[in-house]
Each structure stands twice: as structure tokens, then as C-alpha cells.
Amino acid sequence: MKISGWMLLMGGVAASGGAWGAQAIDFMFPAPVDGKLTMEMTRIIKEFNQSQQQVEVRGIFTGGYDTTKVKAESAAKAGSPPALVIMSANFTVDLALKDEILPMDELFKFSADKQSATDFLQKNFWPAVQQNAQVLGRTYAIPFHNSTPILYYNRDLFQQAGISQPPRTWSELAEDAKKLTNKDKGQWGIMIPSTNDDYGGWMLSALTHANGGNWSNDNYPGEVYYDTPSARGALQFWQNLVYRDGVMPAGVLNTKQISAAFFSGKLGMALLSTGALGFMRDNSRDFTMEVAMMPVQQRQAVIIGGASLVSFKGISEAQKAAAYQFLTYLTSPDVNGQWSRFTGYFAPRMAAYDTPAMKDYLAKDPRAAVALKQLQYAHPWYATYETVAVRQAMENQLASVVTDKSRLVADAARDAQRQADEIMKPYVAQTALKQP
């Protein structure tokens, strides 16, 4: 029998591993939508560990996406880099530019058929999720779960208000929200999360694209388009919902506030992630919840969200081999499909939808197919040098326009652009051609 190089490597380091002589690896994962996701991921890790004896995965829950990045970077700097991390998909560029993560071929060299990571990515994953996994043509991540923003709505409230179908345009959304708002009952027409933990930026970027513009340069991580007509228009639409139309409460809204209002029957519509579908479905018990595609202004458009698997530099060859084994388990059609059905994220692995379990799931709950329908209109998630700080430059200004009626959108967009440009200045200077 031919013994693979991976088996020889794993056998040679067994003594240095954890339980059962297995190679131990640290796996960091966030649960940004609902606490039940932590329990489900713990179950998946346990099943993997019990399914074989070569690798022992130590799961480390790390909170939200932003804190996961901080904790993973801190662990790497302290000399204990995680072998795998479920990382926000738009952090891949920044991590690769800083030389903190491995090119995925460092893991895929342990594949039995020597398949490259890029080949694996391009053959097995939806085209819409691939760009966020690559940096300057090289694959640094493998998608694990993905999302798009979608419209959640209370069909019972729609019927009471005489609304026959979900809004298809921004103007229809505003008009429907007016019909759904009843301040005497404490009932609001629409809520959109505006926090600076990426939800506000993600939603605003989707609205900017729907308004015919771009949020950033998809091919150059040193350029954003905050002070443009399309971005200003999206920002103005958001502020108008609060102060002109009076259909959304003033101030920064987080997802807990929005879901609580929705579940209590005091909210007609919400723009949230399809990754929240499982949570929203489980808790909308007293009325019929439906979902629809994002409303259009100039064009149909959404932004890809979610997370990918990355591996930090500094791990051993044995840990790379172990990380490869667990990565391929997590992204297998069966496991990727299980996670999708539990959470509401759509599975980035296309073959997950060919499994009998997924076909049965979609037949029973067509709401889960809305995110897939939107993929034809999807754009990559914005990813820049210092993504978090650049994103928050606009998110902080978003907070100002929904908190202060007198805050001019033009001033907010200008200030966001200036701050973002200042943050990206080192990268722009680094990549600029020197004059002869």
C-alpha cells in the first residue's frame, strides 16, 4: 500500500500531539449572529475529533468578527498562531498585505491529488464568493459561510396595512414603511442596523451599489468612494427614513434591538443578514415571517458577507497538514450544508445544494433560497488596507446622520472620505510609482 506524505508526516509527529497521539490545532471561530451557533460549532468539532485519530481540534470561541481578528492576531504575536480561523471574509486582504496569514497552497500541498487552493476554490465555490478569498491573484482563504442582506417582513402586519407584496424599490419601501408605522402602538415600519461593527457599513455599501455606485475599488485596496453621489444618496435615503418619513427610530440601532422589536410584532420590516435566517425563523412564532430580495434604486445589487477560513503564519508543517484535514471537512458538501441549514447562511460550496438533505430543506422552506437568487447581483465585500478603521470612518458618520437631524449628509460623506484616505495613505504611498 502506498503511504502518502501526509500520513508519514502525521505519524512522525504523533508524539507531540494531544489526545490519542493526535496533532492538536487551535481553531478560532466567531458567532456574530446568535449564541446557538457556538453550540452547533462545538458539536461539529466534536464529531470531527471522534471521526478520526490523526487530528485533535481545540475550538476557541472568539466573539464577533472584529474581536476574532484582534484575538487571532494577538495569539500569533504571542507565539501561538491559530491553525485555522473563521475570519470575516473582507479581512483577508488586510491580513495578507500585513503578511500575517498563509497562502492556502501551504495547506493544499497536503492534498492527495496535489490540487492547488485556487483550483479547489474556482471549481467548487460560487463565483460571487471567490474574489474575497484572493489577494492579487493568490488564494489566501477558503469560504466557509456567506450571506447577503435581505428584507425580513411581518406578513401579518402587511395584510393589516393592505400591502400585498414586499417593496421592490426604495420608494415603495418608504411608502410601505409609512403604512406600517403606528407610533401610538410603538410600531415602526423599518429598521436597519447602523452599528460600527461592520453591520452599518455592510448595509450602507449594499444601498450604495443599489444606487448605481461602488463603495470601493475591488482591485486596489487603497481606494474607497465615500464622497460620491451614489454613496451620499444612500446616506440621505437612510437619514430620510428617520427624520423626513418618520418610519424608523432615531439613533444607532443594533441587531438585538431590531430583532426584539420584530419578534414582539412591533416592526414591519428589517434589513438584516440572511445569516440570521435561522434565528429569525425560530423566534417569529406569533406571526408569519417572510423574506424578499433587497429593494432596488438604480439597479439590483447586494454585497457578499460572511466568513472564510484562514491559517496564520508560524504554524508547523504538521499543523498545516492537520489544518488541511479539518478545513476540507468543514467545507465538505455535507458539513457545509448542515451549517447552512442550521444558521441561515448560504453554503458557499456549490455541491452542498446537490445533497438530498439540502434539496429537502429548500423544498420545505423556500425562504432559504432568496440569498441564492441574489447571487447573480452580488458584489464582493469591500476589503481595503486597514479594513476595520477605513470602514468605521464611514460607520461613525452614518451614526451621526441618524442621531442628529441637522447633520448634513454632504459633510458626513466628506469627513468620512478624508479620514479613510488618511488611514490608507501608507499603503497608497507604498504602491505609488516613484518619479524618475
Image (cartoon, grey):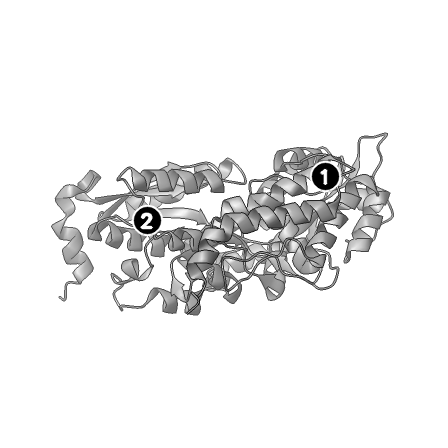
Picture coordinates of residue 143, whole percent (x, y): 44, 56
State whether residue 29 appears in this view. Answer: yes
User: Which residue is at a point 71% across and 64% down the rendered structure image?
Assistant: 299
What is the distance, in whole Å, between disc 1 and disc 2 at their CAs? 38 Å
Which numbered disc flags the more N-terminal residue, 1 or 2?
Answer: 2
Q: Amino acid at mark 1?
A: Val
Picture coordinates of residue 36, whole percent (x, y): 50, 37
Q: Amino acid at mark 2?
A: Phe
Q: Residues within 10 Å of mark 2 (few under 14, many from 20)?
A: many
Q: Nearer the viewer, mark 1 or mark 2?
A: 1
User: Which residue is at a point 71% across and 34% down the rendered structure image?
Assistant: 251
Figure quadrant of residue 267: top right
Q: Is residue 220 above or below residue 32?
A: below
336 to the left or right of 415: left
Picture coordinates of residue 113, whole percent (x, y): 27, 69
Residue on which disc 1 sits: 402
Do the numbered discs 1 and 2 sit on residues whose CB atoms are within 8 Å? no
